[in-house]
Image (spheres, rainbow, N blue to C red):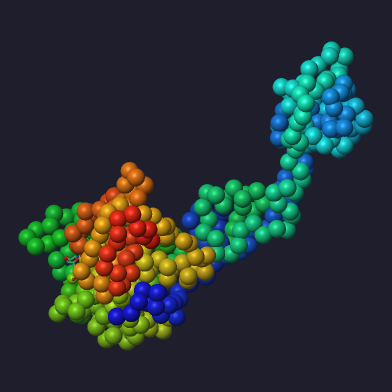
C-alpha cells in the first residue's frame, strides 16, 4: 500500500498525451492552453474618461472654460486643450491631449455663451491612463491555463479567435461485474444497475476529456482479456471499474499482468478507494478503479484527475479550502487517509453528510467535497479547521 501522492507520481512516470490542436475560441471553454496569450496593445489603448463630464486642465478650474467640442466614445478629439478650454466628454471616450482631469457633469453649470464653470471644490482625475492595466507584450495567460469564461474575454481582447490547446484524451470506461445491467434495464434478481460508467463519464467530461463508454464485461477472465485488448486500440487511456480488490472474482489486476502490463501499484492508502491499480505497457496506460461507487468517484477525483491535469501540463489547481468542522468526530481505523463527504452548514462550517460507506452512492448528492483526515488521526475536535477538497 502506498501514499496517494506517491501513487500520482508513479503514474506520472507514464504520462499520456495526444498532442495539441488549434480550435476556434468559441469551442475552447474547458480546454488547456498550449500557447501563451500576449497583450497585442496597451490597455487601455488610449487615455479614457471614466465619467460623463468635461475634460479640462486642473489648473484652470473652476473656470469659466470654453467648450471646444463634444467627444463621444469611439471619436478621436479634434482639439488639443489650451488654457481655459475644455471638451464635453462621455464615459469611455478618448481624453483630448492637454487634459489632466474630467469634471463630472453633475458639478458643472453652463453660462449660455459656450462656457462652463466647475461648482465643486475638488475632483478626482476620472481618467484611466493609457497602459494603466496592461502594456503591449505583457503575458496575459500562460501555457497550462484551463480556459474558463474568465479567460475567454481576455483572449478575444487580444484579437485571437483561434487558440492552440491540448487535444482532449479519449478515455475508455469499462465496467466489470457479472451482476451489472445497463441502467435502462430493470435489474432482475441480484442484478444491479451500472451507474459507475455514467458517473465516470461525467467526471471525465468535467475534467475536459472525451469519455468512451465501453459497456459491461462479466467477471470472466477470457472475456475481460478480450475486451481490454480491444478497448486499448480505441482509446488513449482506459479506466476499468470493479474487480480491483483481492476477492476470487477480482480479476482485473491479474488480467492486466497476463496481458503483459506492469502494475505501478495496486493499492493506495486511502479510504474509500484502497483497491486501485495503474497498469502500463509500451505507452498504453490503464487505471483499474474499484466497483464501489463512492470509491471510484474518489479515486477519479484524487488520483485520475491530478494525473490528467499533469499530463495536460495544466497549472496545478488548488481545490482545497480550510474550514471549521461543525462537531466532534472520531474514527477507529486510522491506517489510511480518509475522505469524508461533507456539506456546508448554515454556520458556514462543514459537517459530514449521512454516509454509510463506499457503496453509499446517494450520500454524495449534497456533498460539496471531502474532508481530508490524515492517516494516523483519530479525531476532529468541534470547531477545528480541516482541509476540504472541493468537488
Ligand atoms: P467490486 O469492486 O467489483 O467488488 O464491486 C464492489 C461493489 O460495487 C459491489 O457491490 C458491486 O455490485 C458494486 N459495483 C461494481 N461495479 C459497479 C458499477 N459499474 N456500477 C455500480 N455499482 C457497481
Ligand atoms: Mg465485481
Q: Quadrant of residue 40?
A: bottom right
- In the image, is 163 to the left or to the right of 242? right
Residue that sits furthest to the right in the current view: 83
Residue at the spot x=7%, y=60% of the render? 189
Evaluate whether residue 368 shows in this view. Answer: no
Image quadrant of residue 261?
bottom left
Picture layout, residue 361 above or below residue 61: below
On screen, residue 94 above or below 7: above
Within the image, what quadrant is residue 73 found in? top right
State which image quarter holds ligand 1.
bottom left
In the image, 229 versus 129, the foreground residue is 129
Residue 85 picture location, percent across and down? 89, 27
> Considering depth in this image, is 107 or 74 the residue closer to the camera?
107
For image coordinates 30% across by 69% down, the residue present is 377
Looking at the picture, does residue 219 appear above or below residue 328? below
- What residue occupies the far top of the structure in this picture? 112
Residue 55 image offset from top left, x and y in percent: 80, 31
Q: Is residue 102 visible?
A: yes
Residue 251 rendering spot, x and y as whole percentages: 21, 79
In this rendering, is residue 67 above or below 235? above
Give the residue drawn at x 33%, y 73%. 287
Amino acid at each position: 500500500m502506498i501514499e496517494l501522492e506517491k501513487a500520482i507520481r508513479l503514474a506520472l512516470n507514464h504520462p499520456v498525451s495526444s498532442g495539441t490542436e488549434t480550435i476556434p475560441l468559441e469551442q475552447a471553454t474547458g480546454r488547456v492552453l498550449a500557447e501563451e496569450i500576449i497583450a497585442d496593445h496597451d490597455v487601455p489603448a488610449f487615455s479614457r474618461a471614466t465619467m460623463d463630464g468635461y475634460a479640462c486642465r486642473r489648473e484652470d478650474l473652476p473656470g469659466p472654460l470654453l467648450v471646444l467640442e463634444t467627444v463621444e466614445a469611439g471619436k478621436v478629439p479634434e482639439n488639443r486643450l489650451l488654457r481655459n478650454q475644455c471638451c464635453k466628454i462621455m464615459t469611455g471616450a478618448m481624453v483630448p491631449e492637454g487634459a489632466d482631469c474630467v469634471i463630472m457633469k453633475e458639478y458643472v453649470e453652463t453660462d449660455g455663451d459656450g462656457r462652463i464653470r466647475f461648482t465643486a471644490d475638488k475632483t478626482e482625475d476620472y481618467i484611466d491612463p493609457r497602459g494603466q492595466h496592461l502594456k503591449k507584450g505583457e503575458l496575459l495567460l500562460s501555457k497550462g491555463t484551463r480556459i474558463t469564461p474568465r479567460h475567454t474575454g481576455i483572449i478575444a481582447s487580444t484579437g485571437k479567435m483561434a487558440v492552440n490547446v491540448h487535444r482532449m484524451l479519449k478515455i475508455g470506461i469499462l465496467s466489470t461485474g457479472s451482476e451489472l445491467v445497463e441502467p435502462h434495464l430493470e435489474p432482475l434478481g441480484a442484478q444491479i444497475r451500472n451507474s459507475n460508467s455514467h458517473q465516470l463519464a461525467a467526471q471525465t467530461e468535467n475534467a475536459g476529456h472525451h469519455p468512451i463508454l465501453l459497456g459491461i464485461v462479466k467477471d470472466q477472465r477470457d472475456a475481460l482479456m478480450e475486451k481490454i485488448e480491444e478497448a486499448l486500440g480505441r482509446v488513449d487511456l482506459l479506466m476499468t471499474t470493479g474487480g480491483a480488490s483481492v476477492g476470487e472474482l477480482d480479476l482485473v489486476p491479474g488480467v492486466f499482468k497476463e496481458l503483459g502490463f506492469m502494475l505501478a501499484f495496486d493499492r493506495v492508502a486511502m479510504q474509500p478507494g484502497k483497491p486501485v491499480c495503474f497498469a502500463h505497457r509500451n505507452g498504453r496506460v490503464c487505471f483499474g478503479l474499484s466497483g464501489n461507487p463512492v470509491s471510484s468517484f474518489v479515486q477519479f477525483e484524487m488520483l485520475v484527475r491530478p494525473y490528467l491535469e499533469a499530463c495536460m501540463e495544466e497549472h496545478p489547481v488548488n481545490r482545497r479550502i480550510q474550514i471549521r468542522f461543525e462537531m466532534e468526530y472520531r474514527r477507529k481505523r486510522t491506517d489510511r487517509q480518509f475522505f469524508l463527504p461533507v456539506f456546508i452548514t448554515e454556520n458556514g462550517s462543514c459537517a459530514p453528510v449521512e454516509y454509510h460507506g463506499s457503496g453509499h452512492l446517494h450520500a454524495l448528492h449534497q456533498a460539496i467535497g471531502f474532508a481530508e483526515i490524515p492517516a494516523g488521526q483519530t479525531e476532529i475536535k468541534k470547531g477545528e479547521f480541516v482541509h476540504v477538497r472541493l468537488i
